[in-house]
Image (spheres, rainbow, N blue to C red):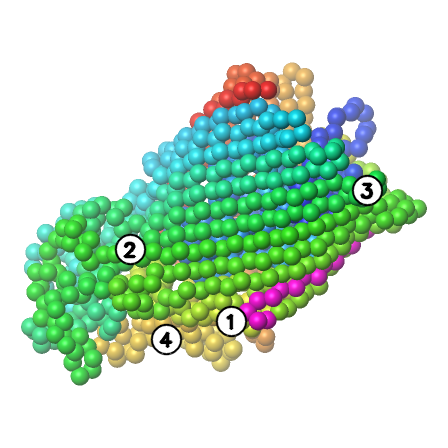
Amino acid sequence: MASKLRLSAIAGAAVVACGAAPAVVQAQQEKSGDVAPPAVIVTGSRIARATVEGPSAVTVISGADITRQGYKNVFDALSNQVQNSGFTQGADFGNTFTPSANTLSLRGLGPNHTLILLNGRRLADFPIAYEGTVNFTNLANIPSSIVERIEILSGGASAIYGSDAIAGVINIILKTRADGFDINAKAGTSSRGGGGDRRVQFTGGQQFGKLTTVFSLELSERDRLTALQRDFMAERDGTPTDILSRRNLDTGKYVDLGNACTDFADMFDQSVFRHTAKAGSYCASRKAANTHWSTQTQNRSKNGFASATYDLDGDTVLFADLLVGRNDTASNTRGPSWTSASTGSGYFLNQNTGVYEVWKRYISPQETGGERRYDRTWEDRALAASLGVRGHIGKSDWKYEAGYSASAYESKNHVPRARANIDSFFLGPRLGTDPDGVAIYAPDPARLTRRLTPSEFDSITGQANSDDESWTHTLAASANGKLLDLPAGPLQLAAVVEAGRQGFTNKPDARINEGYFNTLPGSFVTAGTRTRYAAGAELNVPLFSTLTGTLAGRYDRYEFAERSNGKLTYNGGLELRPRKELLLRANYATSFRAPDMNYIYKARGTGYYSSTTDYYRCAVAGEPMATCEFANKSPGADYVQNGSRDLKPEQGKSWGAGVVWSPSSAFDVSLDYWNIKIDDLVANLDPDQLLRDEAACRLGGLDIASSLCVDTISRITRYADNAPDKAGEVREIRVNPINAAKESVSGFDVSAKYALRTAAYGTFTVRGNYTKTLTRRSQQFAGDEVEDLLHSFDNRDWPDKLAASVNWDQGAVSTTLFATRYGKMPNSEQTGYVTPTTLVNVSAVYRFSDRLSLSLIVNNLFNKVKSDPSGGWPYYPIGNYSPVGRVGWIELNYHFGS
């Protein structure tokens, strides 16, 4: 687990804001006797600090920790940190807008409130919005072999970093020097079968006189894991999926299909059977909806990094670096299906029978040419580059740095869709419409009940191709040095100016609006740009020999869509050291987040959710969620989204206080309280939450006259209860962003480390980090009752999280046992809780020589898969826990050169 290095977050952040070079961590030579305890000095600011501790705590994950503690990559290392207590929809979530991306949620405040930096510089947003609403940074393109360390600051820091730094800042710092070359190969798989992965890394560096170079290449691939590969989720309980049916709309009865179900029995893993319900019989399967469901995406990635520094004259250094990445991802959550006249009424007038009918058909992998034929795929390309110069100003002790950085991201998405000719394929030519506009056909029933060939499937299926891009550019200059001498020490100043521009473009397939696909038009190009300017300053003030103050301020101005707004933020901190082994600290900060680009520029967009649950109809029908026929219905309800250019910046405030005790270099412990508040929060209207609230409003759980209920019910349109088809079903959900909400969260962190060094048995090191959320409150509209999110069944975040490790290092052998305990969380049915869970990783390294080492790594040692059958399929807390189970790897590393 991460070691805890408490450095001045306020002072330490200036280097990040300026796009400066990464901080340098220098190990102190251990001395005998009673000496100052810190084992490292962290220089994380333009204002250099000789003390380890500061007014805020920063968690540091070393590059060695990523391997030693069983982390698969940079994202895995960060997601396991205790500060990352929030639920997010990652690449393996399933129904999500961003299956090729992973992100974090520090303190449960969402991925858009955490600023992620690379070497202190901003990265381009992922070009597709998280949940279709907010912008975020993807963590999928950074080779772990080149990571020097990762620093995590919790709490507001906009006075140093600018926008987005409300919940915290993550700075991924890459290596600037490497001696020789390393080849690393790693491969593994799960003990339950499937989901294996492989990785090869080549890392090195070379000195050429005044020129220093570092590079890293990484190739990795990961196999897909599907629901059918895990027995507990291979089948669905409750009402089986209707895969072949013909229904008389006037009577509501199913038309008998003869022997069709027997003819289809071998489809969908031999699961098709004749199901008899009150309305008659149809062909059904408990595996059809699961056949295409990816619980782990397939991924192939190629990432590279190169950096160079050139010493001009011993005082001035030129620097440049480049990171490039390519990720190819494949996933799916539903197979091909067809419902008659789905873009119109959903039913048609059968001229042969004289009645209105609904025909439905799922198309099996045997007919399409295999399960992968209907995959959704993503081709992601990422680039981040920087160049600049740093040195001294004249002969003074003042230092400067000036640089330019750029980052870009492109994601091409390929989605299979039914073509506009699919109705005529199954129903024959359209013969006109009745007086109400309902389509008339004279279909041959054999077209519905016969198997398709792969070529026939190809004739009614196309591929919609979208191209999404984002980019950001920044120019920054900074300087720092001693301003004057005070009685208690030098007053130091750092200043920074920045100018930047960012933009994005979302280009859906133009054929969607041209009638090529069997879908309604309504997909439009969305694009926008934004310019920003900023200036800031930072002071380090020695007030007394035992008391130091820090103060920072920054003004940011944004220009977009013929509008502009500005925000001044500030922060301050105090460090009191009554004894050299004891530190008392406190900090206060204001912060902000500029409105998401997606919120500002999004045109009217329409589509449908992959699946939705109609909580109101389940309650009215008296059906439990686990077996309700209206739960997790796929495809889900249609939606309409709109952007807003009138959004204001979100405003945050945070404060904290803590104590650090370091009686020796072998032991330290810290306790920190933190409190974060956000006003003018842009309401992120989640469709599932809207449907839950609607049910509560209609059924009396919430006051139907409240502003929350009035707004919620106005956003959900249903078919009439007496409609000939889809009676009472959700027809459309309307979502749009508004500055209305407030949210606050508070808690405390505990960190400790103890190292025991023995002459005969090596070194034993014990580390532990724990976080506990004390309060979590939210208010969607002014005047609404403040909601206790911490104890709400709607809240899927962990209220507490513990990470602990024991490491033994003796000569050529090193072993680490790492455990993470996750607190309780509400079950899917929201009637109780899923109990706390502890997952254990273990790793062992044997060094055959200075050049060759072998590692064995096992994650989830006890093969735990958390069960939650309360809400029905997939019977585990999707997004919070993994269904993969135990995974083991073998890793070989060879070093050559110097």
Q: Mark 4 or mark 1: which comes first in sequence? A: 1
Crowding around mark 2 (Cα neighbors within 10 Å: few <14, some 14 to 19, many 20+) is: some
Q: Residue 486: image x %, image y %?
A: 91, 47
- Residue type beneath disc 1: Ser
Q: Which residue is mark 4?
A: 717
- Residue type beneath disc 3: Gly
Q: Do labels 1 and 2 touch, CB within 8 Å?
A: no
Q: Main secondary structure of the magenta part?
A: strand
Determine the image quadrant of residue 861.
top left
Circle nearer the viewer, 4 or 2:
2
Q: Mark 1 or mark 2: which comes first in sequence? A: 2
Q: CA distance from mark 1 to mark 2?
A: 31 Å
Which residue occupies 24% across, 74% down?
A: 345
- Residue type beneath disc 2: Gln
Q: Which residue is mark 3?
A: 394
Q: Which residue is mark 2?
A: 463
| Element under disc 1 | loop
| Element under disc 2 | strand
Q: Do labels 4 and 2 touch, CB within 8 Å?
A: no
Q: Which residues are magenta?
A: 547-563
